[in-house]
Image (cartoon, helix red, strand yellow):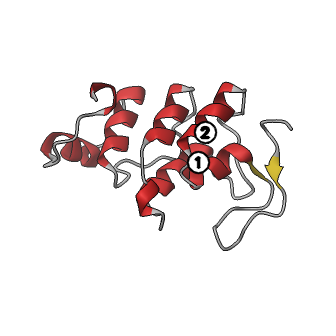
Amino acid sequence: MSVDSVYHEGDRYFDIAHDTPALHVAAWRARPEVVKELIARGASVNATDAQDRTALQLAVKACVDSSWTDRRSPDSVRALLEAGTSTEGIELPTGYDEIDIYCCKITNRISSEARCIIFNSNTRREPFGNR
């Protein structure tokens, strides 16, 4: 099976569009190990689904807008960014501080709202590479 195989029928209940690439499904369902494996096997990191969303957009959505709160982790976002995915369509701030910090670090872009989050955050979490 190709890493760029698609989920033809999709799943309206879980907001998975028809013909969604496997990478997108893994990103939205917050499965970072699957995301990393698909990337390692050559999945297209900049492909879009039938709703014109990228895997990165779905990975961010999984962190800020998913009912799977126990799975919320920026690891899929990090893997996609490190694989060179485009950040087009990602609005900062995202609502998840670690993602905002990492996106700014990778892209060297920072909005005034993200700057406030990064520099005025009350969180004690370390940015990615410092764990």
Of the residues shown, which amino acid type is indicated by label 1?
Ala
Circles 2 and 1 in contact, beta carbons < 8 Å? yes
Query: Can residue 87 be seen from the camera position used here?
Result: yes
Whether residue 40 is situated above or below residue 91 in the rendered picture:
above
**Looking at the image, which is closer to me, 33 or 111?**
33
Q: Is residue 43 above or below residue 19?
A: above
Asked if residue 118 is positioned above or below residue 71 in the image, the reply reads above
Which quadrant of the figure contains the N terminus? top right
Q: Residues within 10 Å of mark 1 (few under 14, many from 20)?
A: many
Return the residue at label 1. 27
Query: For residue 126, which quarter of the picture?
Result: top left
- Disc 1 secondary structure class: helix
**Percent x, y of residue 88:** 54, 41
CA gap between label 2 and label 1 equals 6 Å
**Quadrant position of residue 101:** top left
Q: Is residue 110 visible?
A: no
The C terminus - image quarter: top left
Q: Residue tagged by mark 2? A: 35
Horizontally, residue 124 falls left or right of residue 77, namely: left
Q: Position of residue 119 (x, y in %)?
A: 16, 40
Where residue 34 appears, as percent x and y from the top left, is 62, 40
Q: Residue at x 35, y 28 (%)?
A: 105
Residue beneath the point at 34% across and 55% down: 95
Q: Callout 2, which amino acid?
A: Val
Compared to residue 16, the image places residue 24 above or below, namely: above
Which residue corresponds to the image point at 54% horizontal and 41% vertical from the top-left?
32
Looking at the image, residue 15 sits to the left or right of residue 65; the answer is right
